[in-house]
Amino acid sequence: MGLKFKKSWRSGPVKDLGIDLGTANTVVFVKGKGVVLKEPSVVAIDLNTNAILAVGTEAQAMLGRTPVNIAAIRPLREGAIADFETTKRMLKYFIEKALGKNLILRPRVIISVPFGTTQVEKRAVLEAAVQGGAKEVYLVEEPLAAAIGAGLPVEEPVGNMIVNIGGGTTEIAVIALGGIVKGVSVRSGGDALNRAIIEYLRKNYRMEIGERTAENIKIQIGYATMPNPDIKMEVRGINLRTSLPMALDLSSEEVTNAMQEPLSNMLNGIKKIYEKTPPQLASDIIDTGITLTGGGALLKNMDKLISKEMNLPVTIAENPMDCVANGTGKIIGSMKTLTRLALYHA
């Protein structure tokens, strides 16, 4: 592994790919086309034959609804590969779907990984991508890709702070001169918010709901702060005392209260990185502010919560869910000038 690139990256009729391989969703960027695919990182497998029955959106629809011989699997947890074989097969599916199955040449791929990913975890991603159909694989750290995708001037000698709230992790980094000066990967993201809602209903109402219901609650009536007291949502689940169906009206205020712990974990990570930032760069951030990317940036009033806690301006990037994938795409188009941003594995 190193930072030197082969000439083959810039030659030949190969369609290069950028992949945001996320815990919750995978987003694929094709050079010359932009983002072409955005699907859940879920695979449905027949346990009897080991055959893949569905991937992505179709597989997600099976979560919590499969018969005993079918398993709907999310092969990544908190930004890392938890199931290597399934991740490999999922990557192969997404690569083929993005480029077509009849590939003359195997594609070259840049994949984002969380900040602080271990060498073992990086190796697993590299090998999964190669076995999944990639010719050459490069890795770039997620917050750096997010910052590039959000259009931040990462190459300049000015401090910029990025907070990328994904499904499994929240990536927080201060970036200057093309690199991460201070960064951390907090193992708390959109999935943790969903789990907090599930646990709240279990504890306070003895109601059991699934992940997709929790996700819908978060999207529809979830607020990071200052919830609307007039907004409620009917939630249906299973009564844990009687095992019978039940329904209740859940308020946005309750959802905000339910999500306090994972939100606090994210805020603590942001504060910790800012406190460790060199004074000159910290001073820059007072002017440049914090940029939010990732699906979690879309949680209502998330920008207001962070701005209030940090006393800094906060901006939500345009199309925040696509920023990491767009960042990998921009790196593909600027390999000569951005070579120090990526890790290469032959």
Image (cartoon, helix red, strand yellow):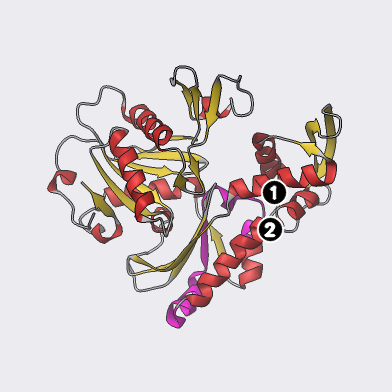
Residue 38, position as x, y percentages in the image: 46, 36
Residue 84, position as x, y percentages in the image: 40, 38
Image: 51 above or below 340 = above
Label 2 with label 1: CB-CB less than 8 Å: yes
Residue projecting furthest to the bottom: 279
Q: Can residue 262 be seen in this snapshot?
A: yes
311 inside magenta stretch: no
Q: In this view, does 204 lie to the left or right of 50?
A: right
Task: Please name the residue shown 30% across and 52% down the image.
Answer: 331
Q: Distance between the residues labelled 2 and 1?
A: 8 Å
Task: Please name the residue shown 28% across and 32% down the image.
Answer: 133
Task: State the image quarter where residue 27 is shown.
Answer: top left
Q: In this view, does 200 lie to the left or right of 13?
A: right
Q: Looking at numbered disc 2 in the image, what kind of residue is underneath it?
A: Glu
Residue toward you, 340 or 51: 51
Image: 151 above or below 31 = below
SS type, badge 1: helix
SS type, badge 2: helix
Mark 2 crowd level (few <14, some 14–19, many ≥20, 10 Å Cα):
some
Mark 1 crowd level (few <14, some 14–19, many ≥20, 10 Å Cα):
many
Mark 2 or mark 1, earlier in chain? 1
Residue toward you, 177 or 314: 177
Residue 184, position as x, y percentages in the image: 48, 63
Q: Looking at numbered disc 1 in the image, what kind of residue is underneath it?
A: Ala
Residue with the mark numbered 1: 196
Can you tell which mark lies on residue 134?
none
* Boundaries of the magenta span: 278-303
Task: Please name the residue shown 54% across and 28% down the image.
Answer: 72
Residue with the mark numbered 2: 261
| Most common SS among magenta residues | helix
Task: Please name the residue shown 52% across and 69% down the image.
Answer: 289
Residue toward you, 199 or 31: 199
